[in-house]
Image (spheres, rainbow, N blue to C red):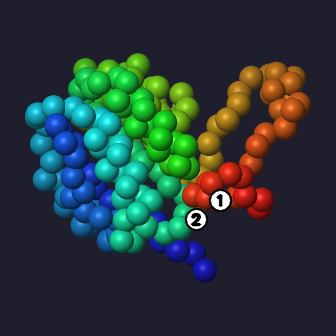
Amino acid sequence: REVADEAAAISFSTGASTDQELTTNYQLVQNAINNYSAGGGTSIDAGIVEGEDELLNGTNATAGASKVMILLSDGQSDETAATDAANDAKNNGIRIVTTALGSADTGLLESVASSPDDAFVAPDPADLDTVYAEIAQIVLAGEQKILSGTMSEVFAELADGEALDGNRQEEGRQPY
């Protein structure tokens, strides 16, 4: 049986808060997001830590489910703190997709993202609908590009194999 995807809404400024915990009621998530306004600081690390906690330990978090964090920022942030928080989340099996809005630090958001293909740029708020439609296609398809190049380059890269993990929520690698 297919289980509906859950979503949550987390805001960050100088700190972070879970404004809507994980739910299948997307209208509740949209209502929380509609209440957001730009301003204050940009503690990306606080947002990532709060999001990671909700995805892994939230009341409605589903063990073994695919965990994806979609991060939107319109500003600058402490690079070391954001990168450390992102690496911790990624090491706990969370895929991070970023969107740099306007004057945001695109280099930082690219390094926070799980891969270069998971880093998007929206020069203007009007571009967000297009960017999020593209992100939705990628995330809902469940695919993540891990290699690109000519066939011989990809085969050479895969010559030693690719480590797979059946459950990234558990320590070590779990067989399928």
Residue 38, labelled with which disc? Answer: none
Tell me the residue at 24%/67% (across/down).
Answer: 28
Residue 143 is left or right of residue 94, and the answer is right
SS type, badge 1: loop
Residue located at (37% from left, 24% from top): 80
User: As rendered, which of 161 and 155 lies closer to the eye?
Assistant: 161
- Quick check: 129 left or right of 38? right
Cβ atoms under marks 1 and 2 closer than 8 Å: yes
Q: Where is the N terminus found, in terms of image quarters?
A: bottom right
Vertical arrangement, residue 96 with respect to residue 147, above or below: below
Q: Please provide percent x and percent y for residue 46.
A: 28, 41
Q: Give the distance between the C-alpha atoms of the residues marked 1 and 2, in whole angstroms.
A: 6 Å
Q: Residues within 10 Å of mark 2 (few under 14, many from 20)?
A: few
Name the amino acid type tagged 2: Gly
Residue 35: in sight, yes or no?
yes
Res 81 quadrant in image: top left
Query: In this view of the protein, can residue 120 be seen by the observer?
Result: no
The residue shown at (74%, 48%) is 164
In what quadrant of the picture does the C terminus appear?
bottom right
Badge 2 marks a residue whose secondary structure is loop
Looking at the picture, does residue 88 appear above or below residue 84?
below
Q: Is residue 16 left or right of residue 53?
A: left
Residue located at (49% from left, 36% from top): 87
Task: Locate residue 122, reporting x and y percent.
Answer: 33, 30
Q: Could you tell me how many numbered marks the image carries?
A: 2
Task: Please give the label number shown on residue 64.
Answer: 2
Residue situated in front as seen by the camera: 50 or 97: 50
- Considering only vertical position in the picture, is 93 above or below 147? below
Residue behind mark 1: 167
